[in-house]
Each structure stands twice: as structure tokens, then as C-alpha cells.
Image (cartoon, coloured by chain):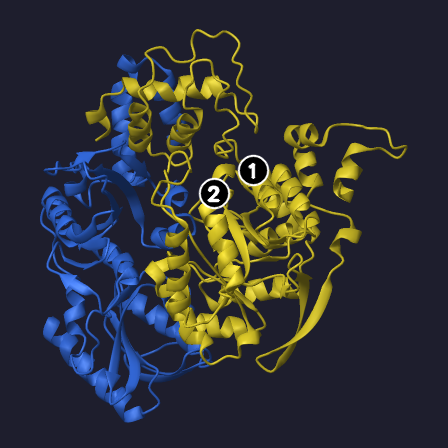
């Protein structure tokens, strides 16, 4: 159990005061309580790097038991095909580049490969990823997903990158335990490592993260986890706990989607730096790979690598943003199975979000109509048994948004 | 009454009594405030698009639909780039046949044909096997992608064996027919000088061109002359003042702050990109990257100028 957990669970006399989850879910103060970790958790190694002729002092952390040490901020390359940006990132002291075979159909890997040609192999850490065909609804692999197919993808990545090996090869975008433990891919990953095509193997998850992280621990195959982790995730406490267990088991943790919540188009914090620093307060996170696309954004991220401590005003900024919500379902899926009528609650919450957050009534109606809801919705149960993880009054929101069925489509079109 | 209250009121109140207000409210918002996005206005063909029947194949599973808020569930980290190209909606359909082969079709709709071209151009390889379908397409084993107006279609096949190409072509044709006329590639591409141009290397960058937030969208093309590789680009401003602002900011960025700027030729020492030859005229800024030879820079900027004039 981490210090933060101990602090929340016990008073000065060691007496349990209040459950951490209950506390956090019920009050903004509780939410803010995680924002500042005690100083002991902030200990980190600072390494001096030469960057563009200037000496910079970057915070470094070890990547689990891999033996790799990384600056706390590195580059997610997914959003740019500009080699100059990648060159400058490396020249400025960043070390790891994170890409994927799917990004621009391999051209992102190709562009990075061109940049890396001129650099010594030990001057950078390259991480890339691939996944195989799966059922989008269940998250489970289809029969086309074979060991051979994954190995072929690894070879394609190496060819695109022009490298003999990568430092980390990830099993990409997993949100089900069964998929994280899917044997053909585990076998492929072990083979990739054995053949020296990847020094380490990992798994990436954007959804249902705690389950996937636990599976990664249980597999004893993965060395690294790349996970969504940000202050707007209402299930961040569960993610943090899973990360702590993974770190304890020796896995390296890389954070992503730190600035954007993963389902928003625009950053919702005034200062991207605050969001990055919030993640880095968790000492079990080795590094973050923000996907900057401008030199100005990169400068902000470099400043975080130099000084990752979250300040009081930055913390207040985050608290403000965190309290605004109320419209956004977090997609935790904990409600599934709770409804006696088996209503598709996450989809209905999405329709609610379209209506009130995005003000797109047309899309909200399309969503509601596509769900084939029964004629009477949330009118006959009396007490609704659904307990939303972020406290939504689910039945009220469903009743509200279900009325969209009554509006003739042509009125909206 | 604010917009949210208006929607809430309409949903909660008696529908028959309030529908008139609701409709008026929607129209008002649509015309004046613009908060209901004209999802289909830019591309009416996709509004009526349905996945077509294909002889010998049956549709398996339900059609999946993703929007800007949910795209990441389908393509995760790749979604961010699609969003910068104003992605609007994705429909995914799956077909299978008796031989257990399957075909998955993804139809991405973007706000405009230029934005759809932009994301298509990011994923297109210049040496691909190109096809005349929609605005343009290409085929490789198990993959056929094509652009049609503001839609970008990606077809993936599985277990199709020796018939793969034929199957992909059949599906592409049926989808293309269902989408309607494919339109053409952005007309400004024809203004790029031909000499040394690398075919099919044209790209459209939707935002933050050259890594600067103040430079918005640009078309950029690869060139190779006598073994020397370089790039030409053009930025189309909304109006002249738009280009003037970009030039002023770029001058500032490159250590040449000015109160005003006049149209004409500039050589900027960009700290990240090296020397850039650049020319501003009216609502166009065009330039050349990765060339140290000043005379070659001038030559291409002039060639580009002529081609742009011809376009007008």
C-alpha cells in the first residue's frame, strides 16, 4: 500500500477514518487529495543532459526492471509526420520515441526511421506496437489473430523503421483480460524477445485499464505497460492501484493521454503542464509520451521534464476542471449487468452527452434510436439498482434522453 | 433562454406543445449560433449511404458507427490525427462468404473533401499501385483504400486467397457507386511545378504546419532534382490579411520582428528547418524547404508563382 493510501485510510492514531474510494468519489476535496502526494513520493533522479548546447537537468526514472532509465517526458510521435520535430525532441534531451504500425499506415515508423539513421543506436529508445484483428464489441480476438500474423507485423515494423531491433514492442490497444493473455500473441512476444527483435515487450490499454494491467502482471510475459492515465478519469484510483501493483511486480509504466482525456478533441486544461505533472506525481509512472505537434508545445513538455513538481496554482487549475464535468460518462462499464432491463447504459449516457455537452441532438437521437429500447424505459423499476461509479443519477438521465425518440427525425434534419 | 435550457425544456416538456419552439430554436441555433453541426451538409451522399449488397457475400454483424468522441475506441492512438482533419463519422461494415473469407469496410467522413484528402494523403505511399476509383485509390494485398469527396474508404480483406484483388475491386466499385460521384483531387495541387515533382507525394497538413501553431494548413510536395531532395509548399489564406498575419508571426519567430510586412520574396533562417525560401502574394504563401542553393530556391519560387497565376 502506498503512502497516499495509508494517509487516507488512517488517522494520527492509526484508526481507519473513511474508505478512500468513498471519500474520493463523494467530495471534490477528496479528489484533490490525490493531487498532492507527500514529498517522499516526489524523490526522483535528475540527470543532466546536453541539449542544443545548453545544459538541461531532466528528471529521470527507471523503467521497471528493464534497466532503462528515461526522462520523465518523452515523445509520442503519433500526431506528426514532421521529422524536424522529432529531431529537435531528441536533440533537446528526450530519449524515447513512441509510435505504432497503424499510425499513418506505417509511414510514421518510416519517418522516424529516417531520423534515426543518423544517430547511434544507444542514443534513443524506440517503442512501437501492433495489434491483430478482433471483435470491436467484445474486445476478443478473431481467428485471424495468429502468432504468425503478429510476428509478420513485427517484421514490418522493423522494416519501416530500418532497425534490427526495437527497444519495446507493444501488444496494442487491449481492453480485455482474455486478450491480454491471448496465447498466440504471448507466444509471439516471447519469440520476438528471444530472437532479439525487441529488447522488451509490453501492452497498451486505453480502456478498462485496471483489468488489463492486472492481466499483464499475471502473464509474467510483459515488461512494460503503456496506459491511459489522467486526472479526469473517475476510475483513476483503480488505475493508480493497478499501476502500483504492476510496478511492484517490476513492470515499467508509461503514461499516455495525460493531457487529453482520451475522448475529448481539445485539451480541457489551461496548462498542459499541470496535467502532465499530475501524472508524474505518481512515483510508479516512469515516463509519459505526450503527442506534441509544435515546437512551443514541446518547450512546455521539456520544462515539465526539468521540473515536474505540481505547484499550488496548477493544482487548483486541475481541481477546477475536474469539478466541471457531470456530463461525461467515463466508460468504466461497471454499470453493465446492473440494470434489470439490461439497458445499454454507457450508450445512453453517450447520447446524454451528445445532447447536453456537445449539443448535437441529431446524433443523440440517432444513437437512441439505434439502441432498440423497450417502449417504457426506466418507469417501472421503482428504486433503480444501478450504481454509477461517478454518481450519475442514471435512470433520470435515461428517462430524459429517451424522449428523443418522440421527436420526428425530419424535425432535426 | 440559453441553448442548453432550450433543449432541456423541449425534452422535458409536452412535446406537442413545445415542438414549434424547439424547431425554431434549432433553426436559430443552426443559422445564428452554429452549434448544431451540419453533419450532412458538406456531403449529402453519405447521409443516404448504406452498405450495398454484393453478390456472393452477406453482411455479418451490425453496422458500427463512431463519431469524434468515440473514434478512439476503434483506432485508439491513431484517432487524434483523424480529429485534426475534422473527422465527422465512421461507419464500419463487415461481409463474409461461404468460404469463410471476410471483408471489413470502413467509411470515414470528414468535414470537407480537402480534409478527407489530407488524412488520405497522410496514409498513402507514393509508390503504391494506384487505381482510378473515386477521386483516387490504391490497392495492395488485403487492402484497398480510396478517396471519394469528403469520404475516405478503407477496405480490408481476410482469407481471400488468390481472388483477393478481384474481391477488393468488386467491393470498392460497389461502395464507390453507393457513395456517388467521387470528385477530384484538390485543384491547387496542379499548381505545383512539374520539374522534379515526386508523383503521389502531395500531402495536406491541416494544422500547425512546420510545427508552428500560427501557420495553419498547407499543401506540401516532395521533389528530387539531380539527387537533391527538397519540398515545396503552399498555404492558402482565407484572405490577404490572414497571410500578412502569418508572415509577421513567422518573421518574429525567425528573429526578424517587423511592424509590417510587404508582399514579396523572403529568405528566413528557421531555427528548426534551416533556410526557407518563401514568397507571399495576396492570399497565398508558398515556399521551398531543404535547399541551400539560393538560385534553386529562387527558380522554384518563380516557377510556382507562374503556375499559381495560371490557375487564376
Q: Where does residue B273 sit, x and y in percent of width and height?
A: 41, 79
Q: Where does residue A61 sit, x and y in percent of width and height?
A: 68, 61
Chain coloured blue: B
Q: Where does residue B190 sit, x and y in percent of width and height?
A: 14, 71
Which structural element holds mark 1?
helix
Does A55 sit above or below residue A149?
below
Q: Describe residue A237's horizontal placement relative to residue A154 as left or right.
A: right
Chain coloured yellow: A
According to the picture, the residue beneath numbered tag 2 turns out to be A182
Residue in front for this viewpoint, B265 or A330: A330
- Between circles 1 and 2, the one closer to the viewer is 2
Q: Which image quadrant is residue A412 in?
A: top left
Dot 2 falls on which chain?
A: A
Q: Where does residue A62 sit, x and y in percent of width and height?
A: 67, 61
Residue in front for this viewpoint, A13 or A194: A194
According to the picture, the residue beneath numbered tag 1 turns out to be A211
Amino acid at each position: 500500500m502506498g503512502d497516499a493510501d495509508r494517509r487516507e485510510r488512517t488517522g494520527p492514531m492509526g484508526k481507519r477514518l473513511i474508505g478512500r474510494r468513498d471519500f474520493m468519489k463523494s467530495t471534490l476535496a477528496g479528489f484533490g487529495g490525490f493531487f498532492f502526494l507527500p514529498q517522499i513520493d516526489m524523490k526522483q533522479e535528475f540527470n543532466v543532459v546536453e541539449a542544443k548546447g545548453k545544459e538541461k537537468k531532466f528528471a529521470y526514472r527507471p523503467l521497471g526492471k528493464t534497466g532503462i532509465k528515461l526522462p520523465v517526458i518523452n515523445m509520442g510521435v503519433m500526431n506528426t509526420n514532421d521529422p524536424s520535430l522529432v529531431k529537435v525532441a531528441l536533440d533537446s534531451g528526450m530519449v524515447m520515441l513512441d509510435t505504432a504500425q497503424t499510425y499513418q499506415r506505417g509511414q510514421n515508423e518510416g519517418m522516424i526511421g529516417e531520423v534515426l539513421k543518423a544517430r547511434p543506436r544507444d542514443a534513443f529508445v524506440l517503442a512501437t506496437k501492433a495489434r491483430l484483428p478482433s471483435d470491436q464489441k467484445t474486445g476478443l480476438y478473431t481467428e485471424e489473430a495468429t502468432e504468425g500474423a503478429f510476428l509478420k507485423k513485427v517484421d514490418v515494423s522493423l522494416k519501416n523503421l530500418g532497425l534490427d531491433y526495437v527497444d519495446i514492442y507493444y501488444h496494442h490497444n487491449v481492453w480485455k483480460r482474455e486478450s491480454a493473455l491471448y496465447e498466440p500473441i504471448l507466444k509471439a512476444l516471447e519469440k520476438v524477445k528471444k530472437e532479439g527483435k525487441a529488447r522488451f515487450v509490453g501492452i497498451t490499454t486505453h480502456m478498462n485499464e485496471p483489468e488489463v494491467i492486472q492481466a499483464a502482471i499475471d502473464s509474467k510475459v510483459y515488461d512494460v505497460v503503456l496506459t491511459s492515465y489522467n486526472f479526469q478519469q473517475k476510475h483513476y484510483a483503480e488505475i493508480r492501484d493497478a499501476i502500483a501493483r504492476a510496478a511492484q511486480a517490476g513492470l515499467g509504466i508509461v503514461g499516455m493521454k495525460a493531457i487529453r482525456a482520451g475522448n475529448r478533441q481539445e485539451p480541457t486544461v489551461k496548462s498542459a503542464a499541470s496535467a502532465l505533472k499530475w501524472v508524474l506525481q505518481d512515483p510508479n509512472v516512469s515516463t509519459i509520451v505526450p503527442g506534441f505537434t509544435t515546437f512551443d508545445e514541446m518547450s512546455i513538455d521539456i520544462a515539465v521534464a526539468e521540473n515536474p513538481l505540481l505547484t499550488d496554482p496548477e493544482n487548483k487549475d486541475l481541481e477546477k476542471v475536474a469539478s466541471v464535468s457531470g456530463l461525461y460518462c467515463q466508460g468504466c462499464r461497471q454499470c453493465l449487468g446492473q440494470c434489470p432491463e439490461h439497458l445499454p447504459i454507457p450508450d445512453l449516457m453517450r447520447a446524454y452527452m451528445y445532447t447536453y455537452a456537445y449539443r448535437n441532438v441529431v446524433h443523440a437521437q440517432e444513437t437512441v434510436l439505434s439502441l432498440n429500447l423497450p417502449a417504457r424505459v426506466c418507469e417501472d423499476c421503482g428504486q433503480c439498482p444501478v450504481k454509477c461509479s461517478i454518481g450519475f443519477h442514471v435512470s433520470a438521465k435515461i428517462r430524459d434522453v429517451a424522449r428523443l425518440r418522440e421527436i420526428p427525425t425530419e424535425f432535426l434534419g | 433562454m440559453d441553448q442548453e435550457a432550450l433543449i432541456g425544456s423541449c425534452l422535458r416538456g409536452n412535446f406537442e406543445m413545445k415542438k414549434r419552439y424547439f424547431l425554431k430554436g434549432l433553426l436559430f441555433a443552426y443559422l445564428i449560433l452554429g452549434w448544431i453541426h451540419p453533419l450532412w451538409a458538406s456531403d449529402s451522399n453519405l447521409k443516404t449511404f448504406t452498405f450495398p449488397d454484393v453478390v456472393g457475400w452477406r453482411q455479418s454483424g451490425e453496422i458500427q458507427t463512431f463519431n469524434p468522441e468515440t473514434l478512439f475506441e476503434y483506432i485508439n492512438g491513431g484517432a487524434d490525427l483523424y480529429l485534426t482533419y475534422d473527422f465527422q463519422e465512421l461507419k464500419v461494415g463487415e461481409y463474409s462468404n461461404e468460404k469463410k473469407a471476410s471483408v471489413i469496410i470502413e467509411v470515414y467522413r470528414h468535414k470537407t473533401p480537402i480534409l478527407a484528402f489530407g488524412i488520405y494523403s497522410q496514409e498513402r505511399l507514393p509508390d503504391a499501385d494506384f487505381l482510378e476509383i473515386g477521386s483516387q485509390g490504391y490497392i495492395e494485398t488485403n487492402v484497398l483504400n480510396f478517396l471519394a469527396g469528403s469520404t475516405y474508404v478503407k477496405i480490408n480483406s481476410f482469407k481471400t486467397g488468390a481472388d483477393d484483388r478481384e474481391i477488393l475491386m468488386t467491393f470498392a466499385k460497389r461502395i464507390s457507386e453507393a457513395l456517388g460521384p467521387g470528385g477530384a483531387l484538390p485543384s491547387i495541387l496542379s499548381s505545383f511545378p512539374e520539374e522534379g515533382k515526386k508523383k503521389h507525394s502531395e500531402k495536406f497538413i491541416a494544422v500547425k504546419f512546420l510545427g508552428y501553431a500560427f501557420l495553419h494548413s498547407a499543401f506540401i510536395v516532395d521533389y528530387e532534382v539531380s539527387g537533391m531532395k527538397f519540398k515545396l509548399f503552399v498555404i492558402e489564406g482565407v484572405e490577404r490579411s490572414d497571410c500578412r498575419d502569418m508572415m509577421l508571426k513567422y518573421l518574429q519567430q525567425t528573429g526578424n520582428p517587423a511592424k509590417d510586412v510587404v508582399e514579396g520574396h523572403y529568405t528566413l533562417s528557421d531555427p528548426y528547418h534551416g533556410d526557407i525560401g518563401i514568397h507571399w502574394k495576396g492570399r497565398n504563401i508558398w515556399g521551398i524547404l531543404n535547399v541551400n542553393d539560393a538560385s534553386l530556391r529562387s527558380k522554384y519560387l518563380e516557377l510556382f508563382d507562374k503556375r499559381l497565376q495560371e490557375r487564376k
